[in-house]
Image (tube, rainbow, N blue to C red):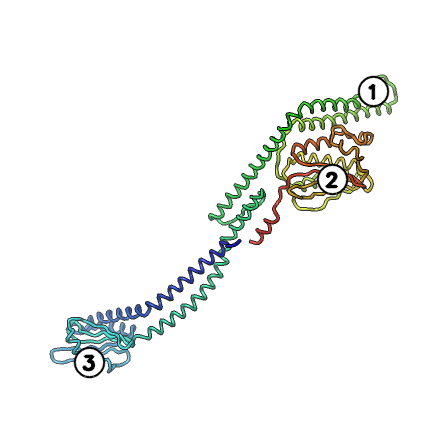
Amino acid sequence: MSTSIRKQFAGVFIALMAGTILLCWFINNIFLESFYVSNKEKTLRTAYEKLNSALGGEERNLEALEDLNEYFVIYNITTVVIESTNVSHSIFESSNGGAEPRLIGSLITNLLYLYESADNPYRIRDRNKEYLEMFGFLNNGSPYIVRTPVESIQESARIANRFLAYVGSIMVMFSGIIIWFISRKITDPILELTGISERMNHLDFEAKYYGRSRNEISLLGENINKLSATLEATISELKTANNELMRDIEKKEQMEEMRMEFLSNVSHELKTPIALIQGYAEGLQEGINEDPDSRQFYCEVIMDEASKMNIMVKKLMTLNQLEFGNDTVTLERFDIAMMIRNYIQSAGILTKQNGIEVRMEESGPVYVWADEFKTEEVFMNYFTNAMNHCSGKKIIDIQLKPADGKVRISVFNTGEPIPEDAVDHLWEKFYKVDKARTREYGGSGVGLSIVKAIMDSMNQEYGTVNYDNGVMFWFELEAAKEDERLKKVISTY
């Protein structure tokens, strides 16, 4: 990502904090000294009010005088007041450590100026950046002077600003590190939702958002989960409808031809077992063989042929429904690897009885879009066919190979290859390569026709390949798996 939200969030926060500290430094540098002097002047005015309250009357106010001394000690204020009566003058001093002759001298020096400005109760002036002095007259006309030292405010401001710069820089770095990690709590869910939306864009609806917080991002994640479920259901419905539409286009043209072909093949296939049943039944009726063993044999032949006819009729009914479009194909997303493993496990008894070794590589889920029930029917026909024709080393090898948006499922069995002139006729109804062997295991020649009808109904490819040591049947389905590139993108977040 060229610019992540996490970097933007951290950058804005750090810039805001650095700007705030820089602004504080600038304000301190420009206005701190003036602010300090202003506060000192305010302190002197308060000192004047307390001094006037204690000594500005006809007599000293002892309670106010005690408060005055305490205030002067706290704020480091020195004062000299010349108290006048009708007969004498006295000097009141408060200096936090002894009288200051210079302060008395300063007051005497300014007596003339004070008398000329008697209308003003006080004046404040700065003396060489070392003191602030306030002088004037109390309410009773007594002249006074109040002084407070002014520390080197410029140097103090420089030290304060330098300290603020050091502390501010450290705080910016420390806060930047903290916000970098805190921002992950905001950006990680957003990146997770981005990854989920990318996977949805590739029609992968397995990803879900599982955020625990109850904020706006969590609400968005829940809505995306609902949207994912809705899209998956809608796509499934659309694929099913599209598949039905494609089938309808071809169905009308093939309908009559399929009826005629079906009746012809059924009459041909049922003729032989019916003739056998009729012959053996007549033999029983006429009592050709009176011994119990012969009669038992005749009955077993009749039951066996009737059972084969029953199986064939059921397969023909299934084939008829598929070819005439009476059976709806529902495309859904499922794990075909799990389906195959379950079927192999259920057929384990038969393979062991026939001494057949079944091989299939272990793999994770392999998702496809197909009709799960009919796909199992296709695989069952392939697997049953492989067991019936397995010879030599007696190995059945099953493979799943994803490629180009498809998954090819192949079933290979060791044994004799199929004659080349018979390969093109394998998918025809009632076609048998070796009629004697087919009849031996009860085959009807309909199984591969059912495979053809199912694969055509799903508009997917199928076929067979001859090898020197055996035969492989295969079919393909539309893949519906996770995009590995997206996995890598999401993991880097």
Foreground label between 2 and 1: 2
Precedes in sequence: disc 2 or disc 1: 1
Q: Which residue is the site of mark 3?
A: 109
Q: Which residue is the site of mark 2?
A: 411
x and y percentages locating residue 481 in the rendered image: 62, 44
Cα distance in 3D space between marks 2 and 1: 40 Å
x and y percentages locating residue 354 in the rendered image: 80, 38
Q: Is residue 99 above or below residue 355?
A: below
Precedes in sequence: disc 3 or disc 1: 3
Give the residue at the far left of this rendering. 86
Residue 232 appears left or right of 446: left
Q: Is residue 491 above or below residue 318?
A: below
Whether residues under marks 2 and 1 lie with C-beta atoms below 8 angstroms apart, the answer is no
Q: Amino acid at mark 1?
A: Gly
Give the secondary structure at mark 3. helix
Front one among 293 and 381: 381
Q: Amino acid at mark 3?
A: Thr
Q: Which residue is the site of mark 1?
A: 279
x and y percentages locating residue 289 in the rendered image: 88, 20
Q: Amino acid at mark 2?
A: Val
Give the residue at the far top of this rendering. 286
Count of marks, rendered view:
3
x and y percentages locating residue 206 in the rendered image: 58, 44
Cα distance in 3D space between marks 2 and 3: 121 Å
Front one among 250 and 391: 250
Residue that appears at 76% across and 35% down: 385
